[in-house]
Amino acid sequence: MRALLLAAGLGTRLRPITNQIPKCLVKINGRPLLDYWLELLSLGGVKQVLVNLHYLPDAVESFLGQSSYPMEISTVYENSLLGTAGTILKNREYFGRGPVMLIHADNLSKFDVRAFVDRYERRADGIEITMMTFHTDAPETCGIVELDDQGVVQAFHEKVARPPGNLANGAVYILSPKVIDFIASLNKDVVDFSLEVLPHYMGRINTYHNGIYHRDIGTVESLTAAQTEYPLALARRALDVLH
């Protein structure tokens, strides 16, 4: 399985930190955010990763050039941002006819990649997307999902004032090749995944729950919180494994 790490964002909500550093290279406890993803994917058995670039691309290229993870890392530059689904479509040849792990690299996350892939591979007939979910402490700022008893998404509530719960979309997915076929059928270069693709697959998206750690590093406040939360989450995970 090949992965797409979306790392082209401007990081406007993290300014002034991102005035001179791309969001994906913002450091959490001394390590760039993108490094956490490369380690996670490498440990999970992912061997080929594509990273899209736009803002301060030379800095990202330089960082990736120093990577020692046992994986093939490719990059693609977007002169104008294409939207998540537009990026997938532009690089359709790279993904071939296999599934795509789609990751928004502006999140900090820890989960079992192999279990995530297994959830996709064991999906029921008709399911074309596996979405990672997590419990959020700020549901009004997230996309909240409602599931049936099989863990299939039945409704989305995107950043509403009184969402029905705190189970959120983690913006990490595995897509079947049929999803790329659908994106191509829209006959557009710029395609918004959340608005134009996910609604089409309502009732055909199953879920994998991340119970370890996940946070959108979108603001200075969330970045600060992650510095403390992430090590604690790993410590709790280690204790759970021991017991």
Image: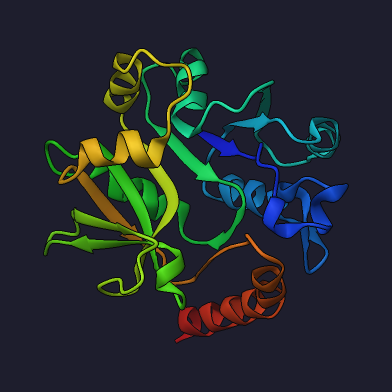
Which residue appears at 54% of the width and 46% of the height?
104
Vertical relation: 175 (above or below) 35: above
Viewer-closest of 151 and 218: 218
Which residue appears at 13% of the width and 36% of the height?
126
Viewer-closest of 8 and 123: 8
Asked whether residue 237 is in view, the answer is yes
- The percent coordinates of residue 128 (x first, y second) are 24, 36
- The percent coordinates of residue 48 (x first, y second) are 58, 30
Q: Is residue 107 left or right of residue 132?
A: right
Asked whether residue 2 is in view, the answer is no
- The percent coordinates of residue 123 (x first, y second) are 20, 44
Which residue appears at 63% of the width and 74% of the height?
230
Which residue appears at 20% of the width and 56% of the height?
155
- The percent coordinates of residue 30 (x first, y second) are 83, 64
Q: Quadrant of the C terminus?
A: bottom left
Vertical relation: 188 (above or below) 134: above
